[in-house]
Amino acid sequence: YTMKLSVLGTILGLMIFAYGFRQLLRWWLPIVLLWLSIPLPELVTSTLALPLQFQASEMGASLLAWRGIPVLLNGNVIMLPGGHSLFVAEACSGLRSLTSLLALSVLLGGMVLQWAPSRILLVLAAIPIAILINGFRVFLTGFLVIFVSPEMGEGFMHTTEGWLMFLVAFVFLGIAAWIIGRGESLFKRHRGGRSDA
């Protein structure tokens, strides 16, 4: 990770040397996206994945219990009726979708929003969206395993479900960007009205 980060640092240094610091500020979007494309070290991902696994398991089990399905939660394993169990593995922690959603929020903020605080707000909004959608994904997997087929919790169907949930998360991110953008335009109009008066 340090070696990959040093390559980015070298690119930034050459950019400042050739074009100056102002150009670096103008090109903030591709620089941030390039930085986000560098995979985090294994130590960091495993440290972040475990609490996310437990969070997703807790949310999924709570939603299943809310639907009246008797469940037993043991760490990151959800015991379901009929002898089925749902193991929320590291891959199902939602860390991958979270990092992807963060990158998309940076890109979306750079394209649609004009102010830096609005862009930061959108990036921060991506975190709870990703966590909530992943918790709902665990609930949906458990629900489908019980009422449709145990095969729904593994293989192609499980992967497809993950993709669909990520699309839902992206739609919610788009809604958040639209709301923040509307807030920007209302604030501008309000400020413009006050300066005219």
Image: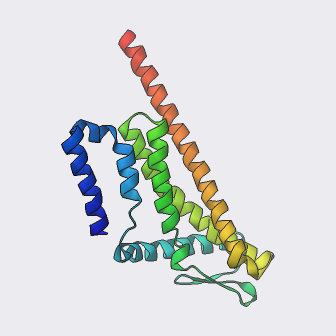
**Residue 2 occupies which quadrant of the picture?**
bottom left
Q: Left or right: where does residue 101 sit relative to residue 45?
A: right
Is residue 191 in sight in this rendering? yes
Single out the residue that lies furthest toward the top. 197
Q: How many labels does the image show?
A: 0
Q: Where is residue 152 in the image (x, y as percent from the top left)?
A: 73, 76
Quadrant, the N terminus: bottom left
Is residue 66 in sight in this rendering? no
Q: What is the basis of the colouring in this image?
A: rainbow
Q: Does residue 112 lie above or below 188 as drawn?
A: below
Single out the residue that lies furthest toward the left. 17
| Residue in the image at 59% along x and 55% along y | 169
**Residue 140 occupies which quadrant of the picture?**
bottom right
| Residue in the image at 50% along x and 34% along y | 181
Q: In front here: 131 or 18?
A: 18
Q: Position of residue 107 (x, y in %)?
A: 47, 46
| Residue in the image at 80% along x and 75% along y | 148
Q: In front here: 137 or 45?
A: 45
Q: Where is residue 99 in the image (x, y as percent from the top left)?
A: 46, 61
Q: Position of residue 134 (x, y in %)?
A: 57, 66
| Residue in the image at 70% along x and 74% along y | 156
Quadrant, the C terminus: top left
Single out the residue that lies furthest toward the front. 18
Q: In front here: 158 or 76?
A: 158
Q: Left or right: where does residue 104 sit relative to residue 142?
A: left
Q: Left or right: where does residue 88 sit relative to residue 192?
A: right
Single out the residue that lies furthest toward the right. 148
Q: Does residue 58 lie above or below 31 as drawn?
A: below
